Image (cartoon, rainbow, N blue to C red):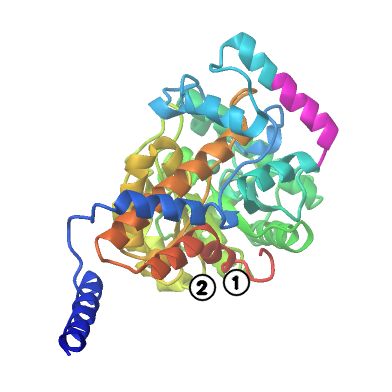
Amino acid sequence: MRLDVRLPVAIAIVIVSASCAFAQSHPYPATEVRDIYTRFLAQIEKIPIFDHHAHPGFPDDPDVDAMAAPPGSSPLRERDTNPELVAAAKALFSYPYDDLSPDHARWLVTKKAELKTQQGTAYFSNLLDKLNIEQSVANRAMMADYLDPKRFVWVFFADSFMWPFDNKHETARNVDEGVYIPLQEKMLHRWMEQEHLKQLPASFDDYLKFITQVLEDNQKNKGAIAMKFEVAYFRSIRFGDPTRQQAEAVYKRYVAGGVAAEEEYRSFQDYIFRYLVRESGRLHLPVHIHTAVGIGDYFSISEGNVMNLENILRDPRYSDTVFILIHGGYPLEREAIWLAAAKNIYLDSSLMEVVMYPAAFKDSLRQWLETFPDKITFGSDAFPYNNALGAEESYWLGVQTARMGLAGALAEMVAAGEVTDSKALEMAHRYLHDTAASLYPGKVH
Ligand SMILES: [Zn+2]
């Protein structure tokens, strides 16, 4: 009889304490947080990834970006002294050495060249297989024939339409612009060639038609899924709202020559940017935009501040345009997540998980997951920096850090009673794959 009485009490205690774990969140995680982390990490490694932002390619391929990287100060983790790069080379290529001294790095360069010859177009697809990346964005000036279109989807650069005039003043601002702006001119000429245009149209109307033609051509005939802006490298990302007449007047004045005053040029660019954003909504071709610190010693952090975009992002005229804030506004990612309150705004974590070590990235990601978990996406920002630190190693670094940061953030949230195990894993799937994939229906999987 006694047993009959005590058993329900014991069961009741178990039920009460189990429900308590989720009834009230608490600030101190349970001691088993590390165990939850280890369990989650194993499960997270099995989730096929959609990489929302990367620049795959070989170091000698000039089409990897529409601009070039100037020499500048690299943060600690991005220096070639980072021992994690040795771990990457070991994981990907069975690298036999424990450092990247010039002699040893040559082994790696030779190994990659051999594999490239043996595997051809499968080289980068095999790399994705190794890292369990199902598909990756290829944010490149033009697509490469050595990237399999089933695995790599193209995101093209749309900035160059904003620099059609004599750029003497723009180029002279500093040494970085001296490299960037001529590359924008080159990009604009490639678009003109693509549309069989020998010179810029005389009328503003026809210039806008030319822009639309490029967007449609890239989308319909070249498989592009989005357009990308890296405009923060070239000017402020605070855009005014000039009238069409104002922009047209500037175009007419300078299309055939003459150097526009900075104010006139900016106003023209503001109009073109807004035109592209509007066309993006009409064509269902999302806007990817660099919002973060940038490379080089002349990048303006204040002019590139993600909050400068707020008037565009919250403008009801662009509610049909899907915006992806590439690099999540870093180092203002904690403010930027609140921009994702609007239904058409998403964040991408690329660069963040390469600049930050897993411990710091975990904290940023946790805040995102606790705010708008369905508006955040993974990107690696893989890029072929040089022969030793290639797109291969940077894919590895991005993926590894994101998985560790994600497992850590979710383990803490479960231990703190904020979410259940199953909810945490659902969030992991969304961040690593589902949310980004849902933005390009029928084009990615
Ligand atoms: Zn990038």
Ligand 1 rendered quadrant: top right
In the image, the residue with mark 1 has its CB under 8 Å from the nearest atom of ligand 1: no
Residue closer to the observer: 152 or 95: 95
Q: Is residue 396 above or below residue 437?
A: above
Where is residue 197? Give x, y as percent. Answer: 78, 49
Residue 282: image tag: 1
- Mark 2, residues whose alpha carbon is within 10 Å: few (<14), some, or many (≥20)? some
Which residue is rendered at x = 39% and y = 56% of the image? 240
Image check: 343 left or right of 195?
Answer: left
Q: Which residue bears the numbered disc 2? A: 320
Residue closer to the observer: 366 or 436: 366
Instruction: Please name the amino acid that badge 2 sits on.
Output: Asp
At numbered mark 1, what does the secondary structure look like: helix, strand or loop? helix
At numbered mark 2, what does the secondary structure look like: helix, strand or loop? loop
Residue 110 highlighted magenta (yes or no)? yes
Which residue is rendered at x = 56% and y = 16% of the image? 100
Q: How many marks?
A: 2
Task: Determine the image quadrant of residue 218.
Answer: bottom right
Image quadrant holding the C terminus, namely bottom right
**Residue segment shown in magenta:** 109-121
